[in-house]
Structure formats: C-alpha cells, structure tokens
Image: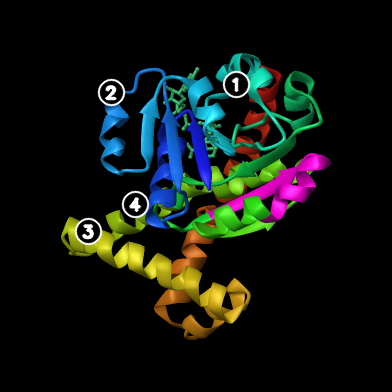
C-alpha cells in the first residue's frame, strides 16, 4: 500500500502514527508546507517527508487529504492533472461535499470521504466513510485501511456532518468529561495523576462494557444504581444541573457551525 498524507497537521499526523502503529503501508509520503516539525518521521525507513505534493501523488496510490477546508480547493487544482485511475482519493475535510471535489477533479475518480478522529494515532478511531458513485468500488479498501486503526461505519454522505460532530469533535467532548471527572476526584482527595488514571480507565471500562455486551447504557446504569444509594443521588443531581441537555445542545451547536464553515 503506497499512501500519501497531504497535509500532515494534527489529523494527518495522527493518521500517519496510526498507519505506522499498524504497519499499514509499504511506503508513506507526508506533506506539509514547512516540513521542519515532521522531519523526524523520516527515521522510519519507508516514510518520505516533503513539501512537494506532486511528488507524493505520483509515488502513491492512496491519497489522504487532511488540510483545512480553505486550503483544499487550490491543492486539488494543483494536483488534478496528476490524478489517474490508480489513485483512491480520501478526503477528511470537514463540510466539503463530494460533488464539490468532483467539480474540480471530475467524477471519473475514486473519491472517498472519511471522518476519522485523533484516536486513530493509537488505533482506536471511530471512522465514518462514504463515497462517490465510482468510489463504491473502493469503499471496502478504504474500510480495510481504517479498520486497522479502529472501527468503521459506512454512512450516506448526508450524515457526514453529524458524524463529524459525534466522532471527530467527540474526542474533545469526551476529554472534557474525563477532565471534569478528574477535577472531582482531586476534590475528593486523589492527587492529580491518580485522579486522571481513575477517570480515564473508568471511561474506557464503561465504553468497553457497551461494546462487548451490546447493551443499552441505561441497562448498565440500572446495575450500578443501588436504590437509595449514592449513584442515583449523584446522577439525578447531574441531570438537575442539565448534564444530558447541555451535551445535546453542544452537539447541535457544533453541527450548525459546520453549515457555516461549508458556506464560508
Ligand atoms: N483535528 C481533528 O481532530 C480533525 C480534523 N478534521 C479535518 O481535517 C482537516 C485538517 O485538520 P487539522 O489536522 O486539525 O488541521 P491542521 O491545520 O493541523 O493541519 C493542516 C495541515 O495542512 C498543511 N498544509 C496547508 N497547505 C498545504 C499544502 N498546500 N500542501 C501540503 N500541506 C499543506 C498545514 O501545514 C498543516 O500542517 C480539516 O479539514 C479538519 O476539518 C477531521 C476530523 C478530525
Ligand atoms: O473542529 C473542527 O472544525 C474539526 C472538525 C472536527 C474536528 N476538528
């Protein structure tokens, strides 16, 4: 697998780490305008770091684009004449529709939209995927690439905006919940390091409980909430303070912001 990551910033580098972690590429190009900060990746023998996108495209089959939305059009313009039937074009760009990509490079290309998150660097991304008509022939390939670095789900493009909020922004939302739990644990007497250890492993355990049992969160909550006990007392206070409501409102606000980004 010859992979190029065009735009090795926060997400691009997380993907690169995930690929290295899972031995997922025979060769990998990482591109960035100023490559000083990522030069160290060349210590992996099969990685080339460059600011030359054209060189990366010519020498790769799978092209993963991870630049900011405002940078994408000019990069596609720069590269469109080099794109051939060997390439699978994978965009991670927020709010950038497949039809807009097709307008620039044509619909006769394998185009995939994917929405991973930064946990891809440790092989734990939730990645949603959709494609253009021709790209349907390469969805299995794209899923195989991302399945090595977490879990994938194929969705209609119309759900991509929601998937961006839940899966990509979601990492930040869960981090804040873990941080708040850590602060609570410190207030109750744990030192900061131990407090974070308790919070993150409990979070990991809760998620795995659902993943492995397939049960609904409330079923698991029922098992924890002893009648007249401390858990239900705490949970109810959190709900009186608007826990679920504030999460839902935050999710919807993020979703609406993507519509603005798309128009801009
Ligand atoms: N950060 C995240 O968790 C996620 C980000 N995304 C999307 O991924 C994209 C990238 O986001 P970030 O990594 O956060 O942004 P970033 O700003 O950290 O990375 C973008 C990179 O592209 C590089 N770049 C700019 N112009 C270039 C060019 N002409 N050729 C090659 N490289 C160029 C920049 O130097 C930078 O390193 C965005 O569209 C974002 O919406 C999607 C899912 C998650
Ligand atoms: O915050 C953002 O706009 C990007 C998209 C999802 C994660 N980061």
What span is in magenta? 126-140
Which quadrant would residue 168 be assigned to in this image?
top right
Q: Which mark is residue 72?
A: 1
| Residue 141, horizontal then vertical, whole percent | 65, 53
Circle 2 sits on which residue? Answer: 36
- 10 Å neighbourhood of mark 2: few (<14), some, or many (≥20)? few
In the rendered image, the vertical position of residue 47 relative to residue 123, given as above or below: above
Q: Is residue 202 magenta?
A: no
Callout 3–callout 4 Cβ contact below 8 Å: no
What residue lies at 44% left-to-right and 43% top-to-bottom? 27
Q: Earlier in the sequence, mark 2 or mark 1?
A: 2
Callout 1–callout 4 Cβ contact below 8 Å: no
Q: Secondary structure at mark 1?
A: helix
Q: Earlier in the sequence, mark 3 or mark 1?
A: 1
Q: Secondary structure at mark 4?
A: helix
In the rendered image, the vertical position of residue 108 relative to residue 224, given as above or below: above
Confirm if mark 1 falls within 8 A of ligand 1: yes
Compare residues 237 and 100 and report the one nearer the observer. 100
Measure how far apart labels 2 and 1 are at the Cα level. 22 Å
Q: Is residue 137 left or right of residue 118?
A: right
Circle 4 sits on which residue? Answer: 179
Q: Is residue 136 magenta?
A: yes
Q: Nearer the viewer, mark 2 or mark 3?
A: 2
Whether residue 43 is visible, yes or no, is yes
């Amino acid at each position: 697998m010859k992979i190029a990551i065009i735009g090795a910033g926060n997400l691009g580098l997380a993907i690169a780490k995930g690929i290295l972690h899972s031995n997922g590429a025979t060769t990998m190009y990482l591109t960035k305008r100023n490559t000083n900060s990522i030069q160290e990746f060349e210590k992996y023998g099969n990685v080339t770091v460059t600011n030359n996108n054209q060189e990366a495209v010519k020498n790769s089959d799978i092209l993963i684009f991870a630049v900011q939305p405002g940078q994408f059009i000019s990069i596609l313009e720069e590269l469109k004449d080099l794109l051939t039937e060997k390439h699978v074009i994978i965009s991670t760009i927020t709010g950038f529709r497949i039809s807009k990509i097709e307008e620039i490079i044509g619909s006769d290309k394998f185009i995939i939209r994917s929405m991973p998150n930064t946990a891809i660097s440790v092989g734990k991304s939730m990645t949603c995927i959709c494609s253009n008509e021709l790209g349907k022939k390469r969805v299995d390939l794209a899923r195989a690439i991302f399945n090595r670095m977490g879990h994938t789900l194929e969705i209609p493009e119309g759900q991509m905006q929601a998937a961006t909020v839940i899966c990509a922004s979601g990492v930040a939302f869960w981090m804040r919940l873990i941080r708040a739990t850590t602060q609570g644990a410190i207030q109750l007497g744990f030192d900061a390091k131990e407090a974070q250890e308790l919070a993150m492993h409990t979070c990991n355990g809760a998620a795995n409980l659902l993943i492995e049992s397939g049960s609904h969160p409330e079923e698991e909550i029922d098992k924890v909430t002893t009648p007249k006990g401390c858990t239900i007392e705490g949970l109810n206070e959190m709900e009186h303070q608007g826990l679920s409501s504030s999460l839902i409102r935050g999710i919807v606000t993020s979703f609406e912001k993507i519509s603005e980004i798309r128009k801009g």
